[in-house]
Image (spheres, helix red, strand yellow):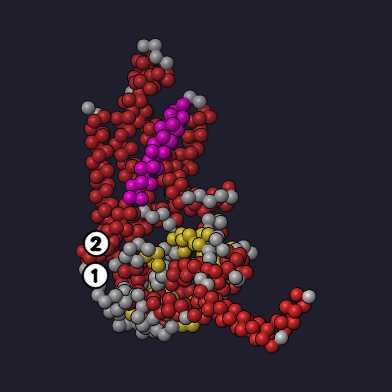
Amino acid sequence: MIAKHVRQGWTSGPGRWAIGLLALVLGLSALIVAPLATPAQAAEDSPAAQAVHGRTFRVATDTTFAPFEFRDSSGKLVGIDMDLIRKIADIEGFSVQIQSLGFNAALQALNSQQADVVIAGMTITDQRKQVYDFTDPYFDSGVQMAIAKDNDQIHSYKDLQGTVVAVKTGSEGEAFAKQRAAQYGFTVKAVDQSSTMYEMVKSGNAQAVIDDYPVLAYGIAQGNGLKTVTKKEPGASYGAAVRKGENKEFVAAFNEGLAKMKADGSYKKLVDSYVGHSSKGAPASRPGFFELVRQAFPSLMLGLRNTLAITAISFVIALAIGIILGLWRISPNRILSWIARIYVAVFRGTPVLVWAFFFYLGVPQLIGHRISIWLAGALTLSLNSGAYLVEIVRGAIDSVDVGQMEGARSLGLTRRMALRRVILPQAVRFATPSIINQLVIMLKDSSLLLAIGFGELLYQAQQIYAANFRVTETLFMVGVIYFVAISALTWMANMLDRRLHR
């Protein structure tokens, strides 16, 4: 009975008014509370964001491709690509781990599963679609031609007859130039970095450069010494790439985040900050040399620290290899001797760069597990230098007069005891100068690791001049640092050598 009266009360006139008032209050509350949801909470509501929420993606990128990826004065990797991927990650609730490798190395890292994604101003082409899956385009590109600022001879493609045109390897500019090289009679020269192209033009090694228009615009704003002489040619679009058939969740989340940024205007604001009329790429004045030194010093010191660290680690390993296999090399045991011979032949007969790429990009495909860049670098330098140290040790032992071994044996020492107590102490004195020389060579060879994105001294220099286009001054600073470091290292090694020869 009570329940019946309650139902009748709620369905009566006053009851209906109460229900309507309650519904109105709840509706207004929903409208007020809804905007308070955070972007991450809103992202979690979509299936795409739920699929990637909390995940970390390894993102490979170029080392120098301003304004899409470059390092600012503090050393932070910035640019359209970098800001975009970080913003989308924030919207969609995932994390990114950036690997600055260089364009070709980035693609190899993706193929070898060292990276999950490549975003590096990568043009979407039908040929690449056969190997990679792309996100929606995030930038519509195009190419332009530029020449040295003081060049008054070239005004169009027709004036390129018999000239050299610099382009960046794998870029849209390279494809555009190759399609027109025969028509206008110029030679195409492909290099790895935009800054290298610009220096070739300024030095007269190339007469023009064809590059993506935003990259050219940024470089000219930074004072790279060039000027454009053609209109922008319509081009293809940039997209982020993943391995074919993999990481579909990332592609969906990226596309969703990109659409949200375009809808709320943050995408246009981001792009305009780099290539718009008030972009970050137009400094008020060009800093002097000493100001450039001050700005570059922290990054260069970081590079020097990494260079010395990888050299020290690799040298210890190489020296151990050299001593052990050097003794095998002179061993009466034929198996051990041939193992040492083969090792020396392989590593002395192949370039260092081949092994750098093999250890960092090839081995992970063979073992199904990624290798850190420090381990790849240490293996590259130590195994290469170890091969030379094997021969240094062998040569030093052979330099000891054979009568020393005969005399030791005649005194009743075994061959092993004679080698340890008589021959090796003398061999150390003979080998020390050559070992010091090999240490210096190893220090300089460490610069080759920049090809796989290792942050040594020359790599840091590239990051600096890719952003400010002060190539000559930056390389001068690097040369001075190398000279000082190698001179100090040689002095310390010679001090040790003199102590041993007392």
- In the image, taking residue 348 as reference, residue 147 lies left or right, namely left
Q: Is residue 454 above or below residue 27?
A: above
Q: Residue 229 at what x, y percent from top left?
A: 37, 83
Q: Is residue 450 above or below residue 490?
A: below
Residue that numbered label 2 is attached to: 294
Amino acid type at mark 2: Arg
> How dense is the environment of label 1, judged by Cα within 10 Å: few (below 14), some, or many (20 and up)?
few
Distance CA(mark 1)–CA(mark 2) = 10 Å
Q: Amino acid at mark 1?
A: Pro
In the figure, 485 relative to 342: above or below? below
Which mark, residue 412?
A: none
Helix, strand or loop under label 1 = loop
In which quadrant is the N terminus drawn? Answer: bottom right
Task: Please report the residue visible at 34 percent of the width from the left and 75 percent of the height from the top.
Answer: 281
Which residue is located at x 60 percent, y 71 percent?
A: 46
- Magenta extent: 305-331
Q: Name the residue rendered at 53%, 59% in the picture.
A: 56
Q: Which residue is mark 1?
A: 287
